[in-house]
Amino acid sequence: MRILLTNDDGIYAEGLQVLVRRFQQVAETFVVAPDHEQSATGHAITMHRPLRAEKIKFLHSPKVLAWSVNGTPADCVKLAVEAILPEKPDLVISGINRGANLGTDVLYSGTVSAAIEAAILGLPAIAVSLTEYKEPVYDYAAEFICKMARSLTLEKGISPGTLLNVNVPGCGRESMSGVSLTRLGVRQYRNAFERRTDPRGRTYYWLAGELIETMDGDDTDVAAIKRCRISVTPIHFDLTNHDLLARLKDWKIEL
C-alpha cells in the first residue's frame, strides 16, 4: 500500500505521530500536514497567498517522507496529490483527531474535510477521530484503522466519491463493545457565544456553548459512541436532496 497521512491538529500532533509509527511498518507512508493546528477550518483552501511545503524528518520515523504545509487540511491533500507525491496514494487517512467528529460537526471539521478532498480527487479516504479530548490514548484507534485500511484497499474498496468517517470512543480497548455502521446524528450547541469585555471596555465574543446531542435513532454515530462502540459512517459530498429533486420534476416553473 501507498498511504498518505494528514490531519488538522498539526504535523507534530500525537495522533498523527501514532499513525505514522503504525503505518510505516506495513505500507509506503507519506505525510503532508498543516504546520500548525487547523481545527474547525472546514473545507477552506488557500487562494490569496503562496503555499509553502517544508520537508521535515520525524525523530522516531526518519524514513517516512513528510512535508509541513502552511495551509489547511484540504490544501495539504490537494497539494500532496497534485504536486508533491511521486505517485497517487492508494488511500488517504486523516487523523487521528483529538476529539470527536460526529453528526453535523463534520461540516466544520478540518479532519473530515481533508478526507473529502481526497474523495473529490477520486481517492479512497478515511477520517478518524478519538472521542476522548482531555487524556487521549491513540494506540488502539491506530491499530483499528490499520486493519481497516488493509481490508479496504486489498479486499472491499470504497465507492467513488465516498469516505469513511470513523470515531473511536475513548473508553479503552477493554470496554469497547463493537463496531457499528452508522448514519450521521445531529449535534447542536446552546448559548454558543459568550460575551466578554476586554480591559479597554470593548465587547468581544468567545465561541463556546453547551453541547446538545439530538438522539434521533439508535443507528447514528452519536448513539454508537454513547454505547462505547466504534462508529463507521460512509459520507459523500453530493449534498443534493434526491427525493425532493424527484418531486420538483413535476413542478411547472415558468420564467
Image: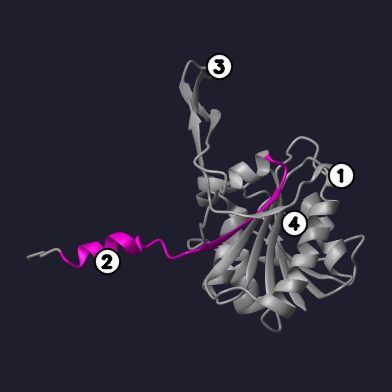
In this view, the residue farthest toward the left is 255
Nearer to us of marks 4 and 2 is 2
Q: Which residues are magenta?
A: 227-250
| Disc 4 residue type (three-letter) | Ile
- Taking 19 as reference, is 252 left or right? left
Q: Which numbered circle lies on residue 246? A: 2
Q: Which residue is mark 4?
A: 11
Q: Earlier in the sequence, mark 2 or mark 3?
A: 3
Q: How is the image coloured?
A: one colour
Is residue 44 in view? yes
Q: Which numbered circle lies on residue 174? A: 1
- Badge 2 element: helix
Gap between marks 3 and 1 measured at Cα:
49 Å
Nearer to us of marks 2 and 3 is 2
Report if residue 240 lies within the magenta region.
yes
Q: Earlier in the sequence, mark 4 or mark 1?
A: 4
Foreground residue, 157 or 107?
157
Foreground residue, 176 or 166?
176
In this view, the residue farthest toward the right is 60
Gap between marks 1 and 2 measured at Cα:
47 Å
- Taking 131 as reference, is 247 left or right? left
In x, y percent, where is residue 80? 65, 73
Gap between marks 4 and 1 measured at Cα:
29 Å
Gap between marks 4 and 2 measured at Cα:
44 Å
Q: Residue at x 75, y 66 (%)?
A: 148
Q: Which numbered circle lies on residue 209? A: none
